[in-house]
Image: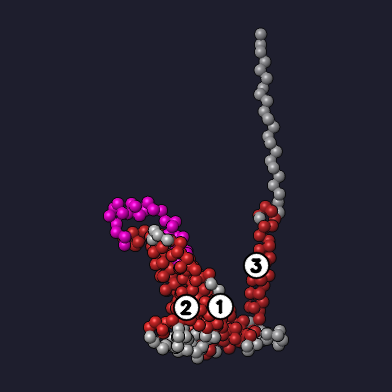
Amino acid sequence: MTTTVAPPVTAAPAAKPRVRRGWTQHGLVFVAPFLLIYVVFLVWPTLLGFKMSFSSVNIAGGNDHFVGFANYAEAFADPRMWRSLWNTLVFTVLSTIPLVLLGLVFALLVHHLRFVQWLWRLSFFGPFLLPSAVVSILWLQMIYPPEYGLINGTLGTDVLWLGDPSVAMWSMVLTTVWWTVGFNFLLYLAALQAIPRHLYEAAAIDGATAWDRLRSITLPLLGRTTTLIVVLQLVASLKVFDQIYLMTGGGPQDATRPIIEYAYDIGFTGYRTGYASAVSYILFALIVIVSLAQLRLFRKREEVAS
């Protein structure tokens, strides 16, 4: 007797879900509101300002005539523009170095302190939360007054911290460091907490001292964070405006006037919007060059180290 075995019944392949094509596939529908705001409030004003830099338009929108590179030629021949640009570069150098070093030192201290860490974090990061107007009034009314200011009263001096051209820039650097070092401190502290502890434990077993662990483990692993902080700090210092405008107004004798304040004075006091736009784009080009140079330099160092 022959038995016939029926072939196994195979289930029909499940239908593939239909993939909806269009904006939702790439997530564009979710980022569209941000892109719209970004284009309207950043991209369009940037392009409009670049167009204005080639015209003689004033703040009222009149006299809008194409002048080519005349505004840029005038800017490069303007001694006050060069003076303000020099002030900006001096402020950038004097402020960036202590802001990076102090941010690292404060982060190392808080990372290794085991008591009331929240108080130290608040002390170092708290000033960064204050608005520029509050910081300016605090230092202008309580720290720098020559008669009753905290510094002169403590040291027994009578220095004109904001009235002496040879001291005013250092005073602005001191105020800025106190105000903004907390941001760099926070970035360094987050990077320190991300370093695996077993690296330090292995180094300690091998007999490495605290200095050896700092030099061979901590600083190399903080390299990318340092690159980020330096680039951000350079860009922020090159764009300095608020505290200088509120505390000195660019004085005394233009000793602290940054290039952004010079462009502001030209555009809103001298009513030369086209020329002010040209000065602003000279600063924009400088910021781009400095940022790209810094990134390329740090990238080369990482390639050599690896």
Contact between labelled residues 3 and 1, with CB atoms less than 8 Å apart: no
- Closer to viewer: mark 1 or mark 3: 1
Name the residue carrying label 3: 38
Numbered circle sitting on residue 306: none
Kind of residue indicated by mark 3 = Tyr
Q: Residue at x 60, y 83 (%)?
A: 264
**Residues at badges 3 and 2 in contact (C-beta under 8 Å)?**
no
Q: How many neighbours does mark 2 have within 10 angstroms: few (below 14), some (14-19), or many (20 or more)?
A: many
Disc 1 marks a residue whose amino acid type is Ala
In this rendering, the answer to whether 81 lies above or below 178 is below
- The residue singled out by tag 2 in the image is 175
Q: Which residue appears at 69% of the width and 47% of the height?
A: 19
Q: Residues within 10 Å of mark 3 (few under 14, many from 20)?
A: few
- Point out which mark residue 133 bears: 1
- The location of residue 101, given as percent across then percent down, is 41, 70
Identify the element where label 1 is drawn.
Answer: helix
Q: Quadrant of the N terminus?
A: top right
Q: Earlier in the sequence, mark 1 or mark 2?
A: 1
The spot of residue 111 in percent (x, y) is: 41, 60
Q: CA–CA distance between discs 3 and 2?
A: 32 Å
Q: Is residue 306 above or below residue 293?
A: above
- Please tell me whether residue 232 belongs to the stretch shown in magenta: no
